[in-house]
Amino acid sequence: FFDHTVIIAEKDPQRDLFLDMEAKKVLRLRLLPEVWAERFAEFVFKKLDKFVQSETAGRVKVVKVEFSENAKNSCSYEE
């Protein structure tokens, strides 16, 4: 889902530029409702947990996602 991908917020002011580059096959684009660290960690948690549970017939679940934006900004998400 994220490999070789550009991720932007749905309301990014340069959205049309990114959509144009995607249409020209310059990049692979993913639009998310919000991309600040806490929301990104939540998105990854939910996406990954759904995948893991599906692949393991519910035997395994994700309990926590930790996300580091840089050395000074990180967060985690768990349910």
Image (tube, grey):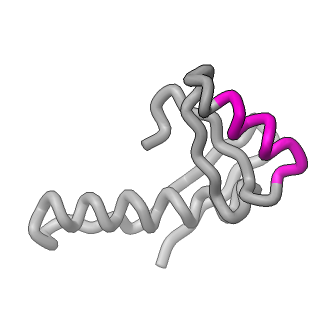
Label count reads 0
Toward the viewer: 44 or 79? 44
Q: Main secondary structure of the magenta part?
A: helix
Rendering coords of residue 64 (x, y %): 45, 63
Rendering coords of residue 32 (x, y %): 64, 57
18 magenta-colored: yes
Q: Where's the N terminus, which quadrant?
A: top left
Q: Quadrant of residue 68?
A: top right
Magenta-drawn segment = 12-21
Q: Quadrant of residue 36?
A: bottom right
Identify the residue at image location x=44%, y=67%.
Answer: 46
15 magenta-colored: yes
Q: Is residue 24 left or right of residue 3?
A: right
Rendering coords of residue 35 (x, y %): 72, 55
Toward the viewer: 2 or 58? 2
Q: Is residue 32 left or right of residue 70?
A: left
User: Is residue 54 positioned above or below 79 on the image?
Assistant: above
Identify the residue at image location x=27%, y=67%.
Answer: 61
User: Is residue 4 positioned above or below 32 on the image?
Assistant: above
Q: Residue furthest top?
A: 26
Toward the viewer: 48 or 27? 27
Identify the residue at image location x=10%, y=69%.
Answer: 57
Q: Is residue 34 left or right of residue 44?
A: right
Q: Quadrant of residue 47?
A: bottom left
Identify the residue at image location x=70%, y=50%.
Answer: 74
Q: Residue furthest right?
A: 13
Rendering coords of residue 31 (x, y %): 63, 52
